Image (cartoon, rainbow, N blue to C red):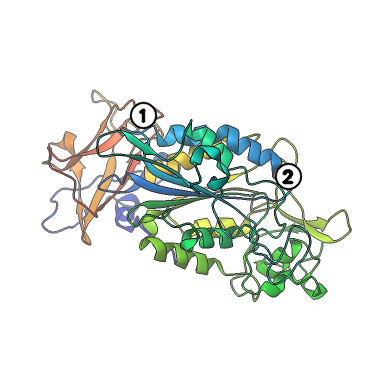
Amino acid sequence: MRRILLAPLLAPLLAPLVLLLPACVDRTVSRVDPVQDNVETFDVPTVVERDVDILFVIDSSPSMEEEHASLRNDFGALLDRLDDGPEGLPNVHIGVVSSDMGTAPYNVNSQCRADGGDRGLMTGAACTALGGARFIEDVLDIDGTRRTNYSGALAEVFGCAADVGVDGCGFERHLDAMRTALGGANPGFVRDDAYLAVVFVADEDDCSARDPGLYDPSTPALGPVSDFRCHAQGITCDDDPDPAAPGRREGCVPDESSAYLESIDAYVDFLVGLKGDEDRVIMAAIVGDPDDVQIGVDPQGRPAVLAGCPEGGLGASEPGIRFRELLSRFTHSSLSTLCAGDLRAALAEVGEKIRASTGDMCLSRAIADRNPVREGVQAECSMIEELDGVERVIASCDSGAATPCWRIVVDETCSQGFGRLIIDRAGAPAPDDGRIRAQCTVQ
C-alpha cells in the first residue's frame, strides 16, 4: 500500500542517464552515487507547513515507570529539534493518551475492565497549568507573538500531561487508542491543514482486537490470559508451527488475516483518510526491538514473549512487531528501541523527523566534494519539483542555470551545522501544493 515517492530520482542513480523532460530542462543531470550511506534524501513540500498536531500514545502498564521518567526528563530534546529551524517552534497541538482501552465486554482483572479504560481521552485536563484543556496549544499569532493555552514552561506542562500512570491494562491497545483519540474523542485537536505526527512509547506490542473475544478469560484455547495471546493470535513467524514452543523466532510480522487482532491496513487507511495524503503523516515509535523475538516461559510457567535488552536499557521490553509494520507503510517514520539508557536520542530523532517532513532541508551530514580540484565544495544533488502532477528538474545555481535553481548555504539554525539545501526563486513565492524530491551526495 505504501507509495514509492522517490521513483523519479532513481533513474539518475542507476546510470548516467539524461532525463528527458520536454519543455522543462535541456541539460544532463549528473549521477548521484547510489550507495545509500552516501546519499541524503529529501521529500518535502515546496512551502513549509507550520501547523503540526503531535499525539503521544504512552503505554500505561506497570512495567513502564523508567520509560515514563525518561520521557518527562528528555522531552526537551524533541523540542530543541523542533525549535531549531529558521522560524522556530512550529504551530503545535500536543496531546497525550494512554494505551488503556479496557477489554470490553470482559472484566479480565482489576486493571483490564469492561469500562473502556481511558477511552482515548487526552490527559491534559488533569494538569493545572492547562486550565482544563485536554491538549497543549502553542501557535504563532498574526502579531508575531505565541498564543498558548498553558502557563509555565512547555516541557514541564508536557511532563504533567505525559504522566499516564502505571496501573493500566496489560492488554495494551495502542493503535485503538490512537484511532479513538484522533477520531473525535478530543474535539479541536486535529486541524484539517496540519501535519499529523503520532509517537508511540511502549515496552510491549500492540494488542488491539478485531474480535474482543481475544480478551475472554474463559477461552484457554487462545493461550494464557496474558499478552502472549496477542502474539499467538496476531503474529506469524518463519517456520513456526507452534507459537508456544520455546526458542528464537525469525521473520516475524503481523498476521493480517488474524481473526482476533485488527489489521495494520485498517490503521493505515484511517490515518491516510484522516489527512488525505500519507505525506502529511509522520509516524514514530520508541519500542522493544522488533527483531529480537524469543519465546520462553513467564514466572507462572506459561508461554511468554521474552523481553529483550534487560540490562543497560530502560528496563526489559518485548518486540514491537506491529509498530514496525505500521511505520513501514509511511515514508516519514522513525523507529527507535528502548535499549538505550534514556530516550534523549530517540526523542531528538523524532523532532528531527517532524521538522524535516514539514519542509526543512537541513543537511545532517557534511556534503561531499565531488571535484576537489576546483576551489570550494562542489556539491552534487539531483532535484525534482512536482507541481500538479508535472515534474521538472531543478538545476544547480552554480551551473549558471536560471531560477528556480538550488544551492547549499550556511545556516546556523540547522542543528548539525552542515548547511541547508534551498531553492533560489529570485524572490518569487514558492508554489503551493508542490513537492521537492532531492538527493545529495554526502561524506
Q: Position of residue 191 (x, y in %)?
A: 37, 54
Give the Cα distance between marks 1 and 2. 37 Å
Residue 386 horizontal/vertical position (percent):
23, 55
Examine the rendering and report whether any part of residue 22 can be seen. Answer: yes
Q: Is residue 104 above or below residue 308?
A: below
Disc 2, SS: loop
Residue at which label 2 appears? 316
Question: Residue 143's spot in the image, x, y percent?
Answer: 25, 35
Going by the numbered disc 2, the residue's amino acid type is Ala
Q: Is residue 135 left or right of residue 114?
A: left
Q: Is residue 339 visible?
A: no
Q: Residue at position x 51%, y 56% from top? A: 327
* Looking at the image, residue 251 lies above or below residue 68: below
Report the disc number at residue 418: 1
**Viewer-closest of 9 and 116:** 116
The amino acid type of the residue labelled 1 equals: Phe
Residue plotted at (64% across, 76% down) = 259
Q: Residues within 10 Å of mark 2 (few under 14, many from 20)?
A: many
Label 1 or label 2, whichever comes before in sequence order: 2
Q: Residue at x 65, y 53 (%)?
A: 291
